[in-house]
């Protein structure tokens, strides 16, 4: 790709978020100016991947070993090693790798090792990132941690992950600030991560999808994927997992070209591109399925293809059954099946809700699958332009469905306290104020006020519910 086109790629990233490019000040007290959050100030931003140094790691058959080894090598190259904290750093790296690849859910050992290293005087940027990521989680601290990682000798994977967390953390709390520097540097780190063909493929492609899905716009996908997708295609495009990734990319492109509005607003060119990209997606995914018919994700992506192509319910049901046979807790597959059956697509309200009720009563499906019924009621309310209206939520059949969905879910997942927010809000919309009040007492990890429209809105809901409930 020509140099000017690569520059244009990053300009598109900025336009996609209403930003203007610029690298001005250092990190000091605050990254950037009052209107900008900037990282990498003073570093050379090379848009073309080929113009940047290539970091190739050692190959390992086990992903966890690769993770630990690249962390240790980055620590050594960055040059802040010391026998006073080396052992604590090693322990932190081991626990971090276990949290990714070993199923470690309790992060206390990682926090303790990090604290011990810092208490001994360690200023290593990866250890400082752990401190911020797993302790304070303050948005500006995460931005500073990313900046420090950019200036380190750690693998691009670890730089990318710190950038991803900084972007996520500032998504809502710093909307007024220009974050273009964060977007550009995070994308560059991901590209360089992808250039290392010894990096564990599954983790890499999962992270690439996560970054591509950060914004659901054509300009974002074009800017992020312009160099990234060809890099990944060259490295893994002939593998079964790589083919699934390419199929996912073609599905994104299909919807980018069609647009996400109603069918009567799509022009002929949009339909042509939509159909063409879906055919390419189908080609990649069917080839992947021939190579490995035991991956539920491939069947799910074929369901997404069918949603766009509309061949017919038997085909959709075929891929749905394959997905659920391979993963009986496949919430996304059940949710997409319900969506396919909605009146906006190929079914009716009755057909859709009857399917959703089987998601609650099934003894074979578990996990979050029962919540498909509650989610579909929210989707239908939106479709009828009655999102928070009693005109939808207080229909006679809605509350029994909502209650059945959540009661079944919590029976299967008694520790899933974060979903109490969802149950509370749905109960409130249904006018079941006593249930709403009861659920708010079960927020074991605190109240996410943003979910209810802010703290003031939540307090108003509590007051209304208490007043109404008192009169009963």
Image: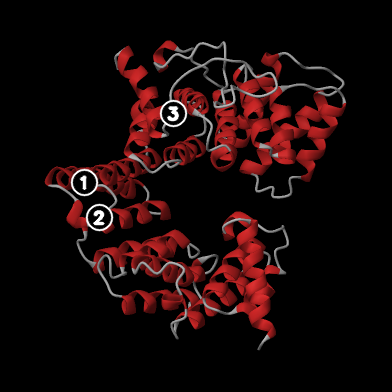
N-terminal label among 2 and 1: 1
Q: In this view, does 189 lie to the left or right of 114?
A: left
Q: Residues within 10 Å of mark 3 (few under 14, many from 20)?
A: some
Badge count = 3
What's the CA distance linking mark 2 and mark 3?
33 Å
Residue at (61, 55) in percent of width and height? 454
Element at label 2: helix
Residue at (29, 14) in percent of width and height? 2
Q: Residue furthest bottom?
A: 472
The N terminus lies in quadrant = top left
* Image coordinates for residue 19, horizontal then vertical, percent: 44, 28
Look at mark 3 in the image and give the residue it sits on.
19
Q: Residue furthest left?
A: 268
The C terminus lies in quadrant = bottom right
For marks 1 and 3, give the one nearer the viewer. Answer: 3
Marker disc for residue 308: 2
* Image coordinates for residue 39, horizontal then vertical, percent: 57, 21
**Marks 1 and 3: CB-CB under 8 Å?**
no
Question: 267 or 394, which lies in front?
Answer: 394
Look at mark 1 in the image and give the residue it sits on.
274
Rendered position, 360 above or below 451: below
Q: In this view, does 416 lie to the left or right of 316?
A: right
Rendered position, 383 above or below 73: below
């Amino acid at each position: 790709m020509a140099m000017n086109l690569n520059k244009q790629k990053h300009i598109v990233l900025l336009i996609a978020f209403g930003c203007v490019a610029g690298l001005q000040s250092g990190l000091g007290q605050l990254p950037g100016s009052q209107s900008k959050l900037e990282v990498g100030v003073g570093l050379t931003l090379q848009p073309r991947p080929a113009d940047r140094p290539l970091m190739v790691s050692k190959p390992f058959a086990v992903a966890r070993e690769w993770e630990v080894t690249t962390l240790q090598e980055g620590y050594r190259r960055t040059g802040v090693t010391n026998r006073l904290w080396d052992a604590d750093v090693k322990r932190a790296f081991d626990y971090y790798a276990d949290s990714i690849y070993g199923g470690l859910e309790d992060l206390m050992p990682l926090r303790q090792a990090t604290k011990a290293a810092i208490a001994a005087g360690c200023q290593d940027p990866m250890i400082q990132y752990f401190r911020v990521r797993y302790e304070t989680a303050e948005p500006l601290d995460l931005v500073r941690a990313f900046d420090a990682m950019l200036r380190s000798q750690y693998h691009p994977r670890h730089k990318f992950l710190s950038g991803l967390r900084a972007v996520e953390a500032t998504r809502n709390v710093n909307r007024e600030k220009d974050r273009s520097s964060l977007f550009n540097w995070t994308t560059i780190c991901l590209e360089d991560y992808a250039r290392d063909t010894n990096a564990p493929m599954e983790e890499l492609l999962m992270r690439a999808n996560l970054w591509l899905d950060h914004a659901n716009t054509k300009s974002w996908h074009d800017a992020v994927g312009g160099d990234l997708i060809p890099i990944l295609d060259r490295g893994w495009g002939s593998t079964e997992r790589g083919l699934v990734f390419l199929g996912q990319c073609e599905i994104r492109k299909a919807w980018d070209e069609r647009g996400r509005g109603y069918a009567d607003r799509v022009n002929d060119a949009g339909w042509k591109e939509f159909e063409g990209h879906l055919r390419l997606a189908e080609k990649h995914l069917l080839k992947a399925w021939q190579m490995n018919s035991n991956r539920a994700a491939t069947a799910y992506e074929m369901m997404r293809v069918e949603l766009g192509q509309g061949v017919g319910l038997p085909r959709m049901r075929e891929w749905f059954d394959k997905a659920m046979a391979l993963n009986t807790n496949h919430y996304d597959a059940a949710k997409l099946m319900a969506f396919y059956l909605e009146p906006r697509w190929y079914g009716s309200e009755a057909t859709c809700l009857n399917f959703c009720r089987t998601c609650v009563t099934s003894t074979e499906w578990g996990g979050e699958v029962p919540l498909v019924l509650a989610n579909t009621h929210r989707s239908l309310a939106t479709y009828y332009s009655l999102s928070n209206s009693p005109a939808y939520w207080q229909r006679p059949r809605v509350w029994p469905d909502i209650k059945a969905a959540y009661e079944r879910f919590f029976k299967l997942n008694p520790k899933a306290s974060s979903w109490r927010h969802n149950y509370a809000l749905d109960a409130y919309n249904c006018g079941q104020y006593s249930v709403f009040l009861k659920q708010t007492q079960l927020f074991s990890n605190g109240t996410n006020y943003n979910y209810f429209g802010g703290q003031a809105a939540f307090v108003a809901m509590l007051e209304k519910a208490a007043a109404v409930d008192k009169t009963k």
